[in-house]
Amino acid sequence: MKQMNTDEAIDKTSLVDDRVNDELATSELPFVMTPHNVNYILPVTYNTSPNMAPFENEAADHQFTLDNMEAKFQISFKFPLMYNVFGDNGHLFVAYTNQSYWQVYNKEISSPFRETNHEPEIFMMFSNDGQIGLLRHSFWGIGFAHQSNGKSGDLSRSWNRLYATSIFDSGPFALATKLWWRIPEDEKETPSSPKGDDNPDIIDYMGNLELTGIYGIDEHRFTMMLRNNLSNPNYGAIEATWSYPIIGQLRFYTQYFNGYGESLIDYNTHNQRIGIGVSINDIL
């Protein structure tokens, strides 16, 4: 299997190269699962205004409200199907990300999982060695992603998209860009029909563009994600994180989110959340 970047081209200070080398070293080990996005658990998060709108009917019947405090966690991994599909380039992966929101402190309603989003993907990454200003254009890729919350009726949310991504880096800094196109779905014949588009306006809030910057200082990792619809009315989101190793592979992990689309059930609702917990990896 050819390494994605030749040894001569490896910059020892590059966070991107460090992650590539770590993945290549463990990709064929039978008891090792390669992280895709960050794997974390935030036992304590605070949302300034939980979105009650999807649960109004149920709340009226059972007289409950959502707690501002809840737990949030994410499990994300990928598996390489094939390296060097096109001669000495083109690396094919499948991936899965699960993100869950747990009303663990809400004993009045038996601490339910408020929302769980499932996102399987298949994508191909290409090694690159271009230069744009001070940044190396290290990878680009294309992929398909399906995301849904696995619910039915009025609570069902889902969408499919094709995306293109590029990764740029320079030593301790990296920038990932992601552009997508939503695959159209048929309209519902009636609002209660199980078939058809559950969320036809999701692009208005989720947009078509996402930028993620990563910066490393010693063992500290700082990230910032920006997403926007680039239209009027303007909707977007920002997510900032900081992590630092505390023991072994375990990292102290903090996250702040402000905007639209934190989860599928909240895609059209403005959320502001801060959480603290631990992760077993960071993006880089």
Image: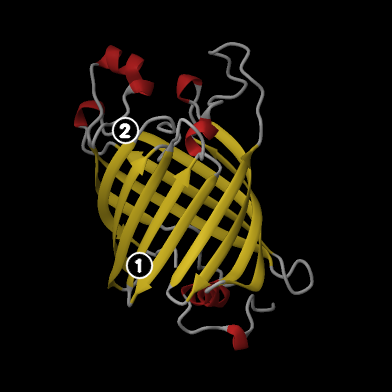
For mark 1, what is the residue? 221
Q: Quadrant of the N terminus?
A: bottom right
Marks 2 and 1 sit apart, C-alpha to C-alpha, by 32 Å
Amino acid type, residue under disc 1 in the picture:
Arg
Q: Amino acid at mark 2?
A: Pro
Colour mapping: secondary structure
- From the top left corner, tell me how far across and down residue 267 is, in percent: 44, 33
Say which element carries label 2: loop
Measured as percent of width and height from the top left, residue 75 is found at: 43, 52
Question: Seen in the image, is 230 located left or right of residue 104?
Answer: right
- The residue where tag 2 is placed is 112
35 left or right of 122 in image: left
Q: Are marks 2 and 1 in contact (CB under 8 Å)?
A: no
Could you tell me if residue 34 is visible in this image?
Answer: no
Q: Nearer the viewer, residue 158 or 14?
A: 14
Residue under the image location 46 percent in, 74 percent down? 15
- Whichever of callouts 2 and 1 sits on the residue coming sooner in the sequence is 2
Q: Is residue 140 left or right of residue 118?
A: right
Q: Give the mark toward the camera: 2 or 1.
A: 1
